[in-house]
Amino acid sequence: MFQFILLRMNMLPVVFENGEIIIVNKKCGLAVQGGAGIRFSLDRLLSEQVGYKVYPVHRLDKDTAGLLVLAKTAAAAAVWTNLIASGEVRKEYAALCAGIPPGKKGTFTAPIETKGERKSAVTDYVVCRTAETVFPDAPGLDGVQTVPVSLLRLTLGTGRMHQIRIHLAQAGCPIVADDKYGDFRLNKLFRSGRGIRKLQLAAVKLTIPLAGNKNVFEIDLPEHLRNACGLLFDSAAT
């Protein structure tokens, strides 16, 4: 209950608002919608903040921070859900990875299994920064002392569940602190050696159609991702 009260006291940051939608900057660790075992959720907190029911129109994992679009009415929710499904909304992410993908930019196209069915999936990426991070004291990890890391910008061509996390893991550069698809051995090293525990993935840019124009909304890297970049890149081998 104490944590819920603190969340209610801290207003959710609204990036944009018009008559149909609200775009908010979601914190890492906050579920978008309520459900079994979820004591508080973004849709509930935002509804209390603005005084009316809001409707999420796309997914963002609980542990993923960043930009999220919610509709103000059920009718608007139907419209914006269709816009997103048809590719009219462009979503870009930043991810800190354990490993470096091939080339400075590229596209992941491996199909992703959804409810027993393999479906096409497309993720474009650009490498922003790379380094070899030094861990001088890494007991119990087979003598690992350096780990290649990279900061990527990724754009979704499709919207499969956990698409970015799966594609990066398949490519051998899983997201740092991804406890579902990541490298558990390296995650342990990041926790013990650098104190990095939160999933290093954030939705940082949205391009959406408004009044016939493409409008861009972009945020800085969230604090936990900035801090992790500092910890890993600043300790890089030279």
Image: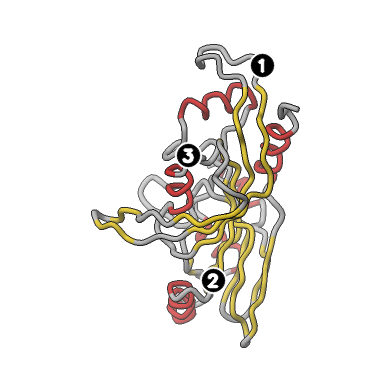
Secondary structure, mark 1, is loop
Mark 3 is surrounded, within 10 Å at the Cα level, by few (under 14), some (14 to 19) or many (20 or more) other residues, namely some
Q: Is residue 196 above or below residue 6?
A: above
Q: Amino acid at mark 3?
A: Gly
Residue 48, position in %: x, y? 56, 62
Q: Amino acid at mark 2?
A: Tyr
Secondary structure, mark 3, is loop
The quadrant the C terminus occupies is top right
Question: In this image, 11 relative to 143: left or right?
Answer: right
**Residue in front for this viewpoint, 121 or 22:** 121
Residue 223 visible in the current orientation: yes
Mark 1 is surrounded, within 10 Å at the Cα level, by few (under 14), some (14 to 19) or many (20 or more) other residues, namely few
The residue located at (47%, 39%) in the rendering is: 172
Question: In this image, 111 relative to 1: left or right?
Answer: left
The quarter of the picture where residue 110 lies is bottom left
Identify the residue position indicated by label 2 in the image: 52
Looking at marks 3 and 1 on the same chain, the residue that comes earlier in the sequence is marked by 1
Q: Which mark is residue 172?
A: 3
Alpha carbon distance from label 1 to label 2: 53 Å
**Residue in front for this viewpoint, 179 or 22:** 179
Q: Is residue 78 above or below residue 13?
A: below
The residue located at (59%, 51%) in the rendering is: 202
Residue 34, position in %: x, y? 43, 55
Identify the residue position indicated by label 1 in the image: 136
Question: In this image, 105 relative to 237: left or right?
Answer: left
Q: Amino acid at mark 1?
A: Pro
Looking at marks 2 and 3 on the same chain, the residue that comes earlier in the sequence is marked by 2
Q: How is the image coloured?
A: secondary structure
- Tell which tag, 1 or 2, sits nearer the viewer: 1
- Number of disc labels: 3
